[in-house]
Amino acid sequence: MKSLPLVALTLLLSIPSASAIALLAEEVEVAEGETLDLGLDVKDCAFPEPPVVPDGNTAAQADLAAASAAIRAYQTDMQASFACIEEAIESLGEDITPEQNSALTSLYNNGVEQIEVIAASFNAQLRLFRARQAEQAE
């Protein structure tokens, strides 16, 4: 029987930017170094590295354009991770335990939250950039 590492359930997101971003973490009651035995392996469902959101107060337009493209690619890659998680749930079928369902659902939901936080951060930085551009145009 395979185990789901604690780190797969504890998702931390830190994005360097001027705005404060909440640290996302799903708490799991497992001692450090231990694994939560769920009878499945979701290593192939790992989330991609989140893109860096540039500071809108100092970033060049090219930096924001590159970040926008990186975020779109990240969202596409995350969809593959979500599909993998959904396949894991489907493969367990009616034999899925409440613990497995809860862990996989939490993993999925944390990924969705990560996308939302990154999008909100980018939009905030884009607003700062546009405000800075408007000030410079005056």
Image (tube, grey):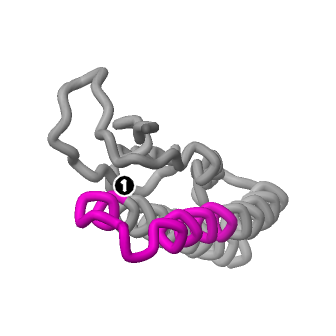
Q: Residue, x 69% and y 53% (percent of image)?
A: 59
43 within the magenta span = no
Left or right relative to 43: residue 106 = left
> Could you tell me residue 57's position as x and y percent?
58, 56
Tell me if residue 10 can be seen. yes
Q: Residue, x 53% and y 63% (percent of image)?
A: 88
From which residue to which does the magenta span run?
78-103
- Given residues 43 and 128, the one toward you in this image is 43
Q: How many residues crowd around disc 1 within 10 Å: few (fewer than 14), some, or many (20 or more)? A: few
> Could you tell me residue 78's position as x and y percent?
63, 64
Looking at the image, which residue sits at the far top? Answer: 33
Dominant secondary structure (helix, strand or loop) of the stretch shown in magenta:
helix
Tell me if residue 132 can be seen. no
Left or right relative to 62: residue 96 = left
- Given residues 37 and 116, the one toward you in this image is 37
> Could you tell me residue 10's position as x and y percent?
35, 44
90 within the magenta span = yes
Kind of residue sitting beneath label 1: Ala
Quarter that holds the C terminus: bottom right
Q: Residue, x 28% and y 26% (percent of image)?
A: 34
> Could you tell me residue 27's position as x and y percent?
21, 48
Circle 1 is placed at which residue position? Answer: 20
- Given residues 84 and 96, the one toward you in this image is 96
Q: Residue, x 64% and y 75% (percent of image)?
A: 130
